[in-house]
Amino acid sequence: MKYVGIRTQIHRNNRNSFLLLLMFPVIILAMVWVFLLLLNYFGGGYYDNYGNYVTGVDFDHVMQSFLSALPWVIGAVALWFAIAYFSNTAMISRATGARPLERRENPRVYNIVENLCMTCGMDMPKINIVDDPQLNAYASGINKDSYAVTLTTGIINLLSDSELAGVIGHELTHIRNRDTRLLITSIVFVGIVSTVMSVAVRLLYNNFIYGGRYVSRSNNSSEGNGGLSFVIVLFVAAVCSGIAYIFSLLTRFAISRKREYMADAGGAELCGDPLALASALKKISANPGLDAVKEPDVAQLFIMKPDEMKEGVMGFMNSLFSTHPDPAKRIAILEQF
C-alpha cells in the first residue's frame, strides 16, 4: 500500500468533510425538487398563457414552489444538522450504552492511552467503556473537547497489553486523521434522509392499513379524491426519499474504506507491533461486540462490524455500502509489515 503521511491524510479528510457538507444538502434539495415535480405530474395538466389545457409538467410552477420551499428546507436541515452535530457525543453514547471510565477503575487502560498519546504528541482523549463481554472499540468526537476512545469490557479483559495498545492506537489514528469528524458528518446527513424516508413509509403503511376506505371509495367523491391525493403524496415522498437515501449511502461509501487501512497502519506504528494489532483483529473478528446497536450509521465508527448486522436483506445492503474492508484483508496487510 502506498504510504500517505499523517498531514496529507488530515488534509484529505478535511477536504472530504467539506465536500460532504456540500453533497448531502444537494441530495436533500434534489429530493425536494423531484418530489414537487412528481406531485405536479400526478396532479394532471395545466393551462398555459393562452388558456389552452396542457397535459404534462408545469416546470414554471415547480420552480416557483421549489423556490418558495427552499428557505424552509435549508433552515430545517441546518437546524437539524446543528443540533445533531453538536450533540453527537451524547447520541452515540446513548446508542452504544457507553459511560466514562475512571482512572481508578482501570489504570491499565489509562497508562496505555497516555503512553500512546505521548508517543504521537496528541492530547489525551476521554476514555469510555461499554459493558459488553464481546470485543469492539470505536473513536468519536468532533474536536479535542469531545474526542473519545470507547472500549468494551470484553476487549479490555481478553486482549493482551500489546494487542490492546494496537487497537487503541488504531482509534487514536482515527482521531488524528479527523476521521471521526468526517464520519459524524455522514451519520447526521444520512440520518436526516433516512428519518424522512421512515416517516413517509410509515404514514403510507398506516394509510393503507387504517385508511384504506379513502382509496376504495369512488373517485367522484371529494372524500375519495382527498384520500387518493394523500396516498399519492405519501407514495411520492417515500420514493423520493428512498432514492435520496441510496445516493446518501453512496456518498457515505465514498468516504472510502482506506480510512480503516490508514488507521490500522497508524495503530501498528504507534504500538510498534503490527502483529499484535493483527492478532487483536483476529480475536475481534471472531467475537465482535456491540450487537445491541442496530444503527448501521453508528456502527461504521466501530473497529469491526457486529455479526448481527451481516444477516438478512438489510445486512446485505449495509455490507454493499460498508465503509469497513474485509477483516481478513486488513489482517493480511498487517502481517506483511
Image (cartoon, rainbow, N blue to C red):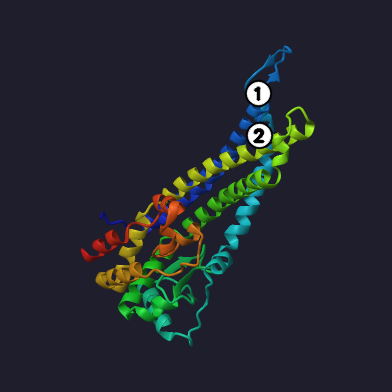
Q: Quadrant of residue 108?
A: bottom left
Which class describes the residues within 10 Å of circle 2: few (<14), some (14-19), or many (20+)? many
Left or right side of 72 for 156: left
Residue at x-position 60% and y-position 58% = 84
The amino acid type of the residue labelled 2 equals Phe
Which quadrant holds the C terminus?
bottom left
User: Which of the two residues, 137 or 306, is positioned nearer the viewer here?
Assistant: 306
Numbered disc in front, either 1 or 2: 1
Left or right side of 128 for 37: right
Q: Position of residue 129 (x, y in %)?
A: 48, 76
Q: Position of residue 131 (x, y in %)?
A: 49, 77
Left or right side of 332 for 286: right
- Tag on residue 66? 2
Q: Position of residue 223 (x, y in %)?
A: 78, 35
Q: Is residue 45 visible?
A: yes
Q: Are marks 1 and 2 in contact (CB under 8 Å)?
A: no
The amino acid type of the residue labelled 1 equals Asp
Which tag, 1 or 2, sits closer to the chain's start? Answer: 1
User: Which of the two residues, 225 or 104, is positioned nearer the viewer here?
Assistant: 225
Q: Position of residue 242 (x, y in %)?
A: 54, 43
* Residue occupied by mark 1: 58
Which class describes the residues within 10 Å of circle 1: few (<14), some (14-19), or many (20+)? some
Which quadrant holds the N terminus?
bottom left
- Examine the rendered structure and indicate whether residue 128 appears above or below residue 241: below
Residue at x-position 34% and y-position 56% = 325
- Examine the rendered structure and indicate whether residue 103 appears above or below residue 272: below
